[in-house]
Image (cartoon, helix red, strand yellow):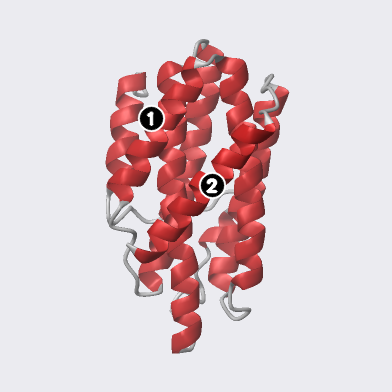
């Protein structure tokens, strides 16, 4: 039996980059606590054209958001000060990779393509994450906590806007929302500092630009 492979930070970055940018992610991993999200019993459901379009538009934005999450976490892991913080960030990035896989699969089922601007979402987020990490672990973890809080709010909004018939997408967003809240609380518990209001506002603006861009391109 070969020993379990230990990945270096550089390995994680390269794996994250290639998977985040892949147009076709692998199928979701086997059932976990979030298995509800991957149950696509009604994957080939019979959503009417307009509902399918509406769901696809939302899932395309969520897919881009998960590409950005990979960039943020990988960038922050690169510049994290302590090994404990880096390990925490990379573990969260693994769960974000599951979210990315779920969104990619659902987008395919809905017959849509992911945003063509994925390299931009990844690179911009990576740069932002690396910059947050350079400010120190306390601020970097505070950045995670605020990001995840805003993402959970965003998912609430999408859960309202999803066609009620689209149970598959709903299960995915609900499972993601639970994970994002857990990521955010964990970052606060590890010592994340509350971010100043202007920074929180700027983060909202940037997210708005990304959502609008991902919806169109
Ligand atoms: Fe996520
Ligand atoms: Fe998250």
Quadrant containing the C terminus in the rendered view: bottom left
Nearest the viewer among 183 and 152 is: 152
Residue lying furthest top: 82
Q: Residue at x 33, y 59 (%)?
A: 115
Residue lying furthest front: 198
Nearest the viewer among 116 and 190 is: 116
Q: Which residue is mark 1?
A: 127
Q: Which residue is mark 2?
A: 205
| Residue 162: x %, y % from top left | 59, 72
Is residue 216 visible from the viewing direction of this image?
yes
Nearest the viewer among 215 and 55 is: 215
Q: Is residue 63 above or below residue 48?
A: above
Nearest the viewer among 124 and 93 is: 124
Quadrant containing the N terminus in the rendered view: top left
| Residue 74: x %, y % from top left | 41, 30
Q: Nearer the viewer, mark 1 or mark 2?
A: 2
Q: Residue at x 67, y 59 (%)?
A: 156
Q: Secondary structure at mark 2?
A: helix
Is residue 74 visible from the viewing direction of this image?
no
Crowding near the residue tagged with mark 1, few <14, some 14–19, many ≥20 C-alpha atoms within 10 Å: some
Q: Is residue 1 above or below residue 108?
A: above
Q: Is residue 127 left or right of residue 43?
A: left
Q: Is residue 67 above or below residue 93?
A: below
Residues at marks 1 and 2 touching, judged by CB atoms closer than 8 Å? no
Q: Is residue 15 left or right of residue 110?
A: left
Number of numbered discs overlaid on the protein picture:
2
| Marks 1/2: CA–CA distance | 17 Å
Instruction: Note whether ligand 2 is within 8 Å of mark 1.
Output: no
Mark nearer the N terminus (1 vs 2): 1
| Residue 62: x %, y % from top left | 48, 57
| Residue 69: x %, y % from top left | 47, 41
């Amino acid at each position: 039996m070969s020993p379990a492979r230990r990945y270096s930070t550089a390995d994680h970055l390269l794996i994250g980059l290639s998977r985040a940018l892949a147009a076709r992610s692998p199928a979701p991993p086997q059932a976990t606590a979030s298995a509800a999200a991957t149950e696509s019993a009604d994957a080939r459901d019979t959503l009417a054209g307009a509902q399918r379009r509406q769901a696809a538009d939302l899932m395309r934005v969520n897919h881009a958001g998960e590409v950005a999450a990979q960039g943020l976490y990988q960038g922050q892991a690169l510049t994290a000060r302590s090994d404990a913080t880096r390990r925490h960030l990379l573990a969260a990035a693994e769960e974000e990779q599951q979210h990315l896989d779920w969104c990619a699969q659902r987008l395919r089922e809905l017959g849509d393509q992911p945003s063509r601007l994925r390299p931009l979402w990844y690179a911009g987020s990576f740069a932002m994450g690396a910059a947050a990490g350079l400010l120190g672990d306390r601020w970097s973890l505070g950045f995670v906590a605020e990001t995840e809080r805003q993402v959970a709010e965003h998912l609430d909004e999408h859960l309202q806007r999803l066609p009620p018939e689209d149970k598959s997408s709903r299960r995915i967003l609900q499972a993601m929302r639970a994970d994002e809240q857990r990521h955010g609380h964990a970052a606060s518990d590890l010592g994340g500092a509350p971010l100043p209001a202007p920074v929180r506002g700027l983060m909202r603006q940037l997210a708005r630009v990304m959502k609008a861009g991902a919806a169109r391109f």
